[in-house]
Each structure stands twice: as C-alpha cells, then as structure tokens.
C-alpha cells in the first residue's frame, strides 16, 4: 500500500474519532459536578456516563475518560463489595447503599452508584474498578460534565399512599438509545408514569410522555405506576422500550411515540407474578435465540424468550400469569443488579447474606 495514502487514512481516521469524541462531550464544562443523589446509570459513546439524580431532578453526563478497549476474556470477581467501598470512603458497610451497577462496554470496568451516609448528611459517590479489580472513586471535583434539569419532577416533599417519597422515583431507570437518553420515572403530571426522550448533547427537556398500561394482576388500567426497569429492544424492526413494573407486567412501548405531552398506551404482553419488584434486566443472544434476563426482588432471575414479541396479544383482562414464556434460573440467588460484560457473559451484584458480591457468569 502507498505509504502516503496509509498516513492520510490514519490521519482521517484519527480526525473522525476526534470529531465523534467532541460531539459526545459537546456542551460539557470542566469543574465540580454536583449530584444530590446518584441512582440509575447508563453509558453512552466514548466513555460518557449518564447518572440519574432524582433528588436534584436532573440527569448528569460525566466524561469518565475511560475509553481504552479492554482485552478480551476478562472476568470480574469482588467479594464484599459493600465493605470494600465503605473502607475506601472511610466508613462502615451499614452506612453504604449501592443504588446501581453498570459495565463500561469498552473498558469493561464496573461503575457503582453509591449513597454514603443517611438522611440529610448523605453524599452521592461514583465508584469504579480498575484493570486489576481495585476500587477507586470517580472524582467529581474537576470533571467535564453537563447537566439537564427535569422540569416537572414530583415535589421534594411529595409522598405516595404509603408515605414513600415520590421525588426519589423521579428517575427509576435510564438508557442511551441512538443519540437520546431515555428516562423512566414519575412526574407531577396527571399521567405521572413518564418516559422522556432527551437528545444528547443535552437540550432543554420537555415534560415527556405519560404512560398508561393495563395491569393484569390488578385488573385495571394504570397511569401512576412507574417503570421499574427497562431495556431498549428492536421489535418487528422498530425501536421499543421493553418495560417491567411492580407485580409484574411486561410492557412494550414504541420509542417513536415518546413525544412531548403525548399520552401513550403501552401494550402489556406478559404478567410474570405479583408481590414482586423487577430490579434489572438485559437483552442478549445465545445459540441463535434472543432472550431477556430479569432480576427480581422475590421471584428470582427470569429468562424470557424474546423472539416475536410483536405477536403476543395485549393483556386486557385480570390474570395472574400469561404471555411471554420464561424459566427461572434456580442457581442464581440474591441478584440485585446485572449488566452484560460481553456477548457471552454478565456481571452480577448479588446479596450473599449481607455481603454484596460482584461476580461474572456465563449468560444462561
């Protein structure tokens, strides 16, 4: 190959990469990033970490600087993660709450959102593993970041019928999809269950789309129950949000319908059991099949078949169980969070009698 042509190709490639990186950090400013709380997280391109701050009613984009590609074949095993985080932060495990765990898809480092302390003195912290598995804090004191406010979040003192804070559910899950951050949670609107589609780099946020679903276990339509966890998923060639709710409807919602002020009726395609709260979910392929893996508070880890989700009839009558078939993975116990490590493995955060452990498994 002509050497000068090779050099020009390399320069163009580097320039293209630099432009892409600049696009994904556009609007960011270096300085102290303020988080009143650190909840749900998701990665975008080029190491941009999105953090949901329910107390601050905002989404914060952080330039993690974590863009080096990992070597293939690595695993992650950390026993007593909560104790190690507490030690790194100079406190005890009973003063640590782990809110979410995600894997950087490029570097394969694990990021954990943490609340240190209780009540008014609680502090939001982001921890991450290094290449050797050691935990370090992602400093927010001087980091490139951008913040966008949620305009119609529940009031700071708003509570539900059980006196639980509605503000803490302003952001229940989020994901980056094709240049937008999709955010689930509650608003102060009449249809308080809300999905927002926020362009990134950030622009002003509209009030989102109100979501109505039929809850088979309850035998009624609902507009105030928040999505607990979701995964972006292509159904019949269209982008959808596959969302899970408490007690446990599984609902498909077209991303194209998430317009400002829209009232969107999701399609319930499964009832997976009541008295249960879905915690986390991922989508993956194995042996030419498509699957969803969902961790739950009281019904274990479910493996759902994900082909042909457009073919299931909407559930519009009271039922305890119906729709998408699944199996419970009996040997996965106490799973609190999960994320894909690569195409064949996942990282789990499990509760082993009070010890919160990170471990790698082969996707079932």
Image: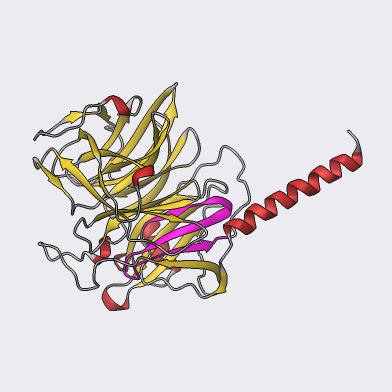
Determine if the magenta segment contains residue 59: yes
Q: Is residue 65 magenta?
A: no
Q: Which residues are magenta?
A: 40-64
Q: Position of residue 196 (x, y in %)?
A: 35, 54
Q: Quadrant of residue 19?
A: bottom right
Question: Is residue 256 among the parts visible in the rendering?
Answer: yes
Query: Residue shown at 27%/50% (left/top)?
Result: 228
Q: Work out which quarter of the rendered image holds the N terminus and state it.
A: top right
Residue at far top of view: 288
Residue ID at (52%, 53%): 133
Q: Position of residue 50 (x, y in %)?
A: 46, 58
Quarter of the figure with the C terminus: top left
Q: Residue 27 location, x and y as percent? A: 56, 66
Q: Main secondary structure of the magenta part?
A: strand
Q: Please tell me whether residue 84 is drawn above or below residue 335 in the rendered image.
A: below
Report the number of discs.
Answer: 0
Kindly identify the residue that appears in the image at 29 percent across and 66 percent down.
Answer: 152
Report if residue 130 is visible in the image.
no
Q: Residue furthest bottom?
A: 121
The one of 5 and 257 positioned closer to us in this rendering? 257
- The picture places residue 39, in percent across and down from the top left corner, at 36, 60
Colour scheme: secondary structure
């Amino acid at each position: 190959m002509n050497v000068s042509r090779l050099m020009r190709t390399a320069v163009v490639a580097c320039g293209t990469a630099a432009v892409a990186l600049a696009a994904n950090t556009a609007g960011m400013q270096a300085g102290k990033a303020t988080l009143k709380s650190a909840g749900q997280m998701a990665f975008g391109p080029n190491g941009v970490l999105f953090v949901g701050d329910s107390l601050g009613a905002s989404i914060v984009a952080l330039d993690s600087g974590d863009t080096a590609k990992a070597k293939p074949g690595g695993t992650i095993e950390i026993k007593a993660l909560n104790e190690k985080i507490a030690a790194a932060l100079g406190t005890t495990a009973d003063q640590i709450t782990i809110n979410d765990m995600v894997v950087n898809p490029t570097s394969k480092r694990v990021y954990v959102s943490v609340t240190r302390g209780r009540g008014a003195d609680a502090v939001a912290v982001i921890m991450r593993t290094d290449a050797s598995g050691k935990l370090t804090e992602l400093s927010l004191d001087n980091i490139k970041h951008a913040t966008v406010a949620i305009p119609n979040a529940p009031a700071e003192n708003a509570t539900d019928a059980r006196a639980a804070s509605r503000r803490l559910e302003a952001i229940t899950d989020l994901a980056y999809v094709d240049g937008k951050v999709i955010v689930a949670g509650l608003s102060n609107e009449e249809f308080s269950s809300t999905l927002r589609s926020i362009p990134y780099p950030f622009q002003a946020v509209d009030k989102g789309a109100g979501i109505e679903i039929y809850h088979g276990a309850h035998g009624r339509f609902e507009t105030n129950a928040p999505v607990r966890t979701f995964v972006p998923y292509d159904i019949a060639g269209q982008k959808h949000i596959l969302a899970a709710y408490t007690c446990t409807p599984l609902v498909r919602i077209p991303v194209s319908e998430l317009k400002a002020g829209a009232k969107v009726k999701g399609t319930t395609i499964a009832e997976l059991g009541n008295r249960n709260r879905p915690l986390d979910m991922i989508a993956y392929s194995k042996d030419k099949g498509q699957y969803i893996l969902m961790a739950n508070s009281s019904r274990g880890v479910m493996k759902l078949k994900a082909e042909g989700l457009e073919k299931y009839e909407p559930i519009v009558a009271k039922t305890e169980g119906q729709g998408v078939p699944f199996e419970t993975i009996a040997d996965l116990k106490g799973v609190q969070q999960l994320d894909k490590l690569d195409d064949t493995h996942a990282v789990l955060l499990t509760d082993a009698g009070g010890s919160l452990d990170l471990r790698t498994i082969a996707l079932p």
